[in-house]
Image (tube, rainbow, N blue to C red):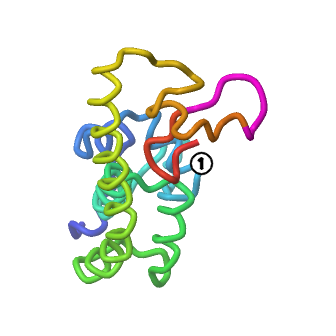
């Protein structure tokens, strides 16, 4: 049997990829990875799925959402595993996202330092939670702090 034909169980893939089996089932349900089934109905993964899982995890660390990761993987021909050239092309597209996050975190750090100095945390006047009292335009009630433009 050639190494490319070696199939891994879900447990083997989880150990080698450093993720939980539940994460692999979730990735499969989301269409990010695919498994075949043994005669007994157990999931079996080709070895190349290891690289695909590594790609998914790296993209998540960058901050991509699963729909963004799915879209990136969909650009690959025939659903193949990303190679070095693919990673270079796709990761270059993520640079603006990282730049936005870095800028947002730097701005948060600057505001947080000022906030620690005043200690107010007033929802009406706090520069961290409600800069320039912009939340009053959204009506009464609590509002979420957004660390970056893509946060919920």
Q: Quadrant of the N terminus?
A: bottom left
Residue 40 visible in the picture: no
Residue pictured at 39% horizontal, 63% vertical:
97
Whether 138 is among the magenta residues is yes
**Which SS does the magenta portion mostly show?**
loop
Residue 113 visible in the picture: yes
- Residue 93 position, x and y percent, is 38, 75
Residue pictured at 51% horizontal, 62% vertical:
68
Extreme-top residue of the structure: 119
Whether 27 is among the magenta residues is no
Location of residue 52 by image quarter: bottom left
Location of residue 51 by image quarter: bottom left
- Residue 55 position, x and y percent, is 32, 60
Give the residue number, with chain letter if any, for mark 1. Answer: 29
Residue pictured at 36% horizontal, 43% vertical:
9
Q: Considering only vertical position in the picture, is 15 above or below 150?
A: above
Magenta part of the protein: which range?
Answer: 137-144
Q: Secondary structure at mark 1?
A: helix
Q: Considering only vertical position in the picture, is 117 above or below 97?
A: above
Q: Quadrant of the C terminus?
A: top right
- Residue 37 position, x and y percent, is 52, 51
């Amino acid at each position: 049997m050639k190494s490319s034909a070696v199939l891994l169980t879900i447990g083997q893939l989880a150990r080698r990829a450093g993720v939980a089996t539940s994460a692999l089932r979730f990735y499969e349900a989301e269409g990010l990875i695919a498994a075949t089934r043994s005669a007994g109905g157990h999931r079996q993964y080709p070895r190349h799925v290891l690289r695909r899982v590594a790609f998914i995890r790296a993209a998540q660390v960058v901050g991509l959402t699963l729909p963004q990761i799915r879209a990136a993987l969909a650009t690959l021909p025939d659903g193949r595993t990303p190679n070095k050239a693919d990673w270079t092309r796709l990761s270059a597209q993520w640079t603006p996202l990282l730049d936005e996050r870095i800028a947002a975190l730097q701005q948060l750090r600057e505001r947080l330092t000022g906030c620690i100095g005043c200690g107010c945390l007033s929802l009406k006047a706090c520069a961290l939670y409600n800069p320039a009292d912009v939340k009053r335009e959204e009506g009464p009630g609590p509002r979420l702090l957004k660390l970056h433009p893509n946060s919920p």
